[in-house]
Structures are given as structure tokens and as C-alpha cells.
Image: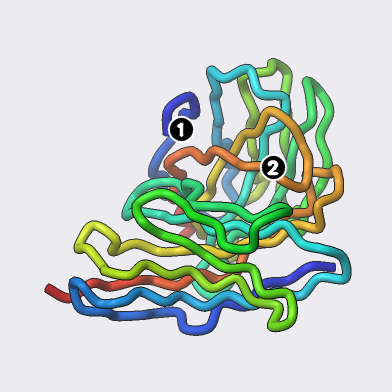
């Protein structure tokens, strides 16, 4: 079975500083990996995803993530934080197989951006 | 949240009462899902549907039932609500069910069971 660990339930950065949100996964097969963002009082929306191919994936709003198989990681980064980035971020993993019951979410990291 | 509407958005109820949450989509997607979101647990799948009258259990299905009589509507029912079911419930949809599946989420329904 797949699982996801997000290190740090809360991360604070200054506006303009680097954003780094950590995600490690466990999967017995090549994983599909996702980052979702949740703004206050809203549902989750997709930031980016990795399925196959290039390991550096670019998403919306300047975010990117790199799939590192040797480290079983899929950390999310953004070079310069903006106030509008304050939200909760969820990493998720799928085993790539057909089936609706194969997507597993991490516990989330709440990002605070300090002016 | 275009294309997905959840109702009610907020509900307070008492232990032992039945509760039904509704998810309505206008995207004509085949797959619909109910998740619950709790601090320290992230999102966990309750039930999902892969077509009209076709549903299956997720990770945390105990105490919940679902129904899908039309493509656009997916109902989540708590037959007898308990305090442990206090949570935020999210509906999601997708056109297919593959490993690269991207879900579109509703805005959530916050349920408080006293």
C-alpha cells in the first residue's frame, strides 16, 4: 500500500523567501505523485503532478517539485514566497493502477507567509 | 469549485440524528467521491461511485452510506450521527479512474455533531 509523510504540519516563511514543503512517500510500485493546495474555506485544487518522464515538474503559481526515487521524496518548492501562497498543502500518492481507491493523502502542511 | 456544489455548507446536529450531505455536479463526470478531512489525518476516502447505482467503500466507510440515483448527484448519509463524525466533508469528481487521476473538489461541508 502507498503512504505519504509530510514533514512539518506548519511552516512559516518571510515574504520573498524560499518555500520548501517536504513530502516523502512509500510505494511498492512506481508512484504517481501530486501536490494539492487548499485556500481557506475552499476545496483542494491541483498544483502539480508527476506521473512519468521528467522528474522536475512545474505547476501553477510558480511552484515546482522534483521526484527523487532514491530518496523517495517529492518536495515542493517556490523560489520566492508571496502573501497569496498562505494555504494548506497536501501531498498525495497513487500506485498508478486503475481504481478509485488508490489515492492517499498526507496530513497536510499549513504555510504561513510573514510580511 | 466550478461544477461541484455541496449542500449544506455548514450543519450542526445532535448525536443520534440522521444527516444527509449532497454533492451535485454539472460536469457529467463518471466518478464521484466523498472524503473527510480531519486535523492530523489529511483527507480520507469514505465512499466513491463509478456510475449510477454503483458505489464502493473507501478507507473509513463505517457509519456512512451513499447513494447515487443520477449521474449528477451523490448523497452521503450518516444514519445516526456520532461526535466522531464531526469533520469537514469534501466531495470530489473525476472523469476517469486512473493512477494519474486528478480530482476536482467541492468547497466542503462542515458538520458538527454535538
Say which quadrant the N terminus of chain A sits in. bottom right
Q: Residue at x 74, y 31 (%)?
A: B96
Residue A93: x and y in percent read 69, 61
Q: Residue furthest front?
A: A54
Q: Check disc 2: other Cα within 10 Å, few if <14, some if 14-19, many if 20+.
A: many
Residue A44: x and y in percent read 47, 49
Say which quadrant the C terminus of chain A sits in. bottom left
Q: Is residue B24 above or below residue A10?
A: above
Q: Chain of mark 2?
A: B
Residue B24: x and y in percent read 54, 24
Q: Quadrant of residue B43?
A: bottom right
Q: Quick one: A115 or B40, which is closer to the camera?
A: A115
Q: Chain of mark 1?
A: B
Q: Quick one: A82 or B16, which is closer to the camera?
A: A82
Q: Is residue B2 above or below residue A52?
A: above
Location of mark 2 (residue): B101
Amino acid at each position: 500500500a502507498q503512504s505519504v509523510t509530510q514533514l512539518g504540519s506548519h511552516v512559516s516563511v518571510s515574504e520573498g523567501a524560499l518555500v520548501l514543503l517536504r513530502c516523502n512517500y512509500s510505494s511498492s510500485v512506481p508512484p504517481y505523485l501530486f501536490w494539492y493546495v487548499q485556500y481557506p474555506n475552499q476545496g483542494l485544487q491541483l498544483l502539480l503532478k508527476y506521473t512519468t518522464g521528467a522528474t522536475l515538474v512545474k505547476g501553477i503559481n510558480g511552484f515546482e517539485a522534483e521526484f527523487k526515487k532514491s530518496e523517495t521524496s517529492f518536495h515542493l518548492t517556490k523560489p520566492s514566497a508571496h502573501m497569496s501562497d498562505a494555504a494548506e498543502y497536501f501531498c498525495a500518492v497513487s500506485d498508478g493502477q486503475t481504481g478509485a481507491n488508490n489515492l492517499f493523502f498526507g496530513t497536510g502542511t499549513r504555510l504561513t507567509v510573514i510580511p | 469549485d466550478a461544477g461541484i456544489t455541496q449542500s449544506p455548507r455548514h450543519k450542526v446536529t445532535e448525536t443520534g440524528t440522521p444527516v444527509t450531505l449532497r454533492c451535485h455536479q454539472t460536469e457529467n463526470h463518471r466518478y464521484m467521491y466523498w472524503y473527510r478531512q480531519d486535523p492530523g489525518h489529511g483527507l480520507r476516502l469514505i465512499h466513491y461511485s463509478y456510475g449510477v447505482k454503483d458505489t464502493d467503500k473507501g478507507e473509513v466507510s463505517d457509519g456512512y452510506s451513499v447513494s447515487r440515483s443520477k449521474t449528477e448527484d451523490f448523497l452521503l448519509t450518516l444514519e445516526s450521527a456520532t461526535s466522531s463524525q464531526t469533520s469537514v466533508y469534501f466531495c470530489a469528481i473525476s472523469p476517469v479512474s486512473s493512477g494519474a487521476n486528478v480530482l476536482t473538489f467541492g468547497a466542503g461541508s462542515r458538520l458538527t455533531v454535538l
